[in-house]
Amino acid sequence: MVDFWNIVQEIEDKGASVQVLNMNLDTASSQGRLMMGVLASVAEFERSLIRERQQDGIERARREGKHLGRPQMDEQLKADVVAFVQAGNSKPATAEKFGIGVSTVYKLVKESS
């Protein structure tokens, strides 16, 4: 919410005001500032609820032993990628063949050195 008011203040410092036309709100009036504050508070509250639900979901997944994050590449696939590049194939062709990103190919080759 602080960011919102900083942006509003920056706009007002330049001689303008924030207007929400479809809601008839204007920060130039006391009533408009009050309503903008209420709306900003509701948005901040909603964001904190989303964060809480996200954390609850992550904790539940951990308790259930589920893997969080990207799936790990198995060691055999890593070795195959490196061998394919070392056999003289280009890194973009290797990435396409194995269905991985070019940056991943570069990373695997570098790690194998």
Image: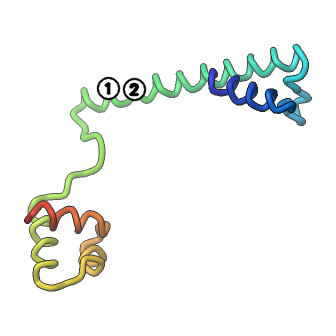
| Alpha carbons under labels 2 and 1: distance apart | 6 Å
* Residue 55 numbered mark, or none: 2
Find residue 79 and report its horizontal and vertical position in percent. Answer: 9, 68
The residue at 78%/22% (across/down) is 36
Q: Which mark is residue 104?
A: none
With 73 as the anchor, is 11 left or right in this view? right
Location of residue 6 (image quadrant): top right
Mark 2 residue element: helix
Q: Which residue is mark 1?
A: 59
**Residue pushed farthest bottom?**
88
Q: Are marks 2 and 1 in contact (CB under 8 Å)?
A: yes
Q: Is residue 49 left or right of residue 66?
A: right
Locate the C terminus and report the quarter of the image it occupies. bottom left
Q: Amino acid at mark 2?
A: Gln
Crowdedness of circle 2 by 10 Å Cα count: few (<14), some, many (20+)?
few
Q: Secondary structure at mark 1?
A: helix
Quadrant showing the N terminus = top right
At x 30% / y 69%, what residue is drawn? 102
In which quadrant of the rendered view does residue 104 lie? bottom left
